[in-house]
Amino acid sequence: MVAAAGYGKTTALRRWFPPSGVRWWRGPEVTSQRLVDEIRAFVEDRPLVVDDLPRLSAEAVQALAAAVDDLPYAATVVLSSRWPPAATAPGWVGRCGWQELGPADLALTPEEVGDLLAAEHGLSDPALADQVYGATGGWPALVALTAETLRLDGVPSGDLVPTVSQPGGPLQTYLVGVVLAGLPSAAVRLLRCAADLTPFSAELGRALGHRQATETVRLLRRSSRRLGRVSRPGSGNRPGGTPISPQPPPGTTNTDRRWLRPAPTCRPAPTRRPSES
């Protein structure tokens, strides 16, 4: 299971695999080698769930897949992480046929957004539910923060985004302090560059000087429906991602997080001209 913070991975796992019936581990508490050793020694018929797995190297991912493949019987092993597996070669799928769940499987539907707004926040307008879904893509944490902002500050007559994404507000603070803080610096730079450019593709990112654009776009697409809404070459769509202000929230200095420093304007990458003979 791969999804960004706030998608409800742990909640979903505890609903699907009640702790009393599984062997449950927290990823940061174990090393990848210990996890491999435990899987190889796995003799119980209970599912093994590893939640909040940290980012693993390609070698660690392959070792985990091989350990599960080598089990002599059918076993359920669930890995949950904010990070897509570092290796997506055929060896990761293995003969056991790993199945990956992502943001699309965890996001709330428009109907679920409407139910949450009505039941927990007293906001029962169906049109508002559609607006909240459109602004958040069903990202559960963003839906909850947006709903709370609207409940406290009121529902604007126009677009929701300027109201709920004010600098220093709950939504912006969460995105900057939790979501962006966990991303590689290359991803943060690309997001800040892509904010005013739609459609945005990996090709455009490379043209603007982002050397890791292809890998970064792949990471964002697999971890979030909103942060990863950039276009594929030739698609011609104009996706709307979640607005993220590059300015730090009140009380945060640029020295607290280096990636919060104002980014230079994205410029086309320099091209080399063949020397004249």
Image (tube, helix red, strand yellow):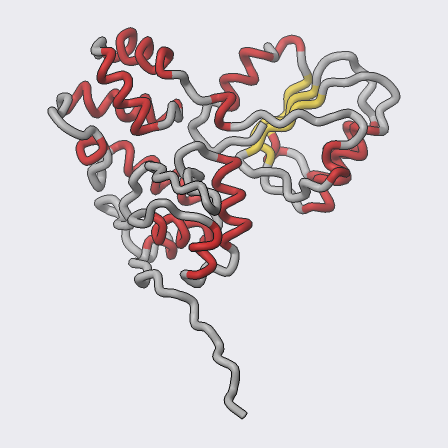
User: 50 left or right of 70?
Assistant: left
Total numbered labels placed on residues in the image? 0
Quadrant containing the C terminus in the rendered view: bottom right
User: 42 left or right of 146?
Assistant: right
The image position of residue 118, as x and y in percent, is 26, 8
User: 1 left or right of 248?
Assistant: right
- Taking the spot 19% from the left edge, 19% from the top edge, the residue there is 151
Residue 99: image quadrant is: top right
- Taking the spot 22% from the left edge, 9% from the top edge, the residue there is 124
Residue 128, relative to residue 206: is it above or below? Answer: above
Viewer-nearest residue: 72 or 200:
200
Residue 139, relative to residue 210: is it above or below? Answer: above
- Taking the spot 52% from the left edge, 87% from the top edge, the residue there is 275
Viewer-nearest residue: 153 or 189:
189
User: 146 left or right of 24?
Assistant: left
Residue 56, relative to residue 106: is it above or below? Answer: below
Viewer-nearest residue: 270 or 190:
270
Q: Farthest residue toward the right?
A: 72
Q: Farthest residue toward the left?
A: 157
The image position of residue 204, as x and y in percent, is 43, 55
Quadrant containing the N terminus in the rendered view: top right
The image position of residue 170, as x and y in percent, is 26, 32
The image position of residue 105, as x and y in percent, is 51, 21
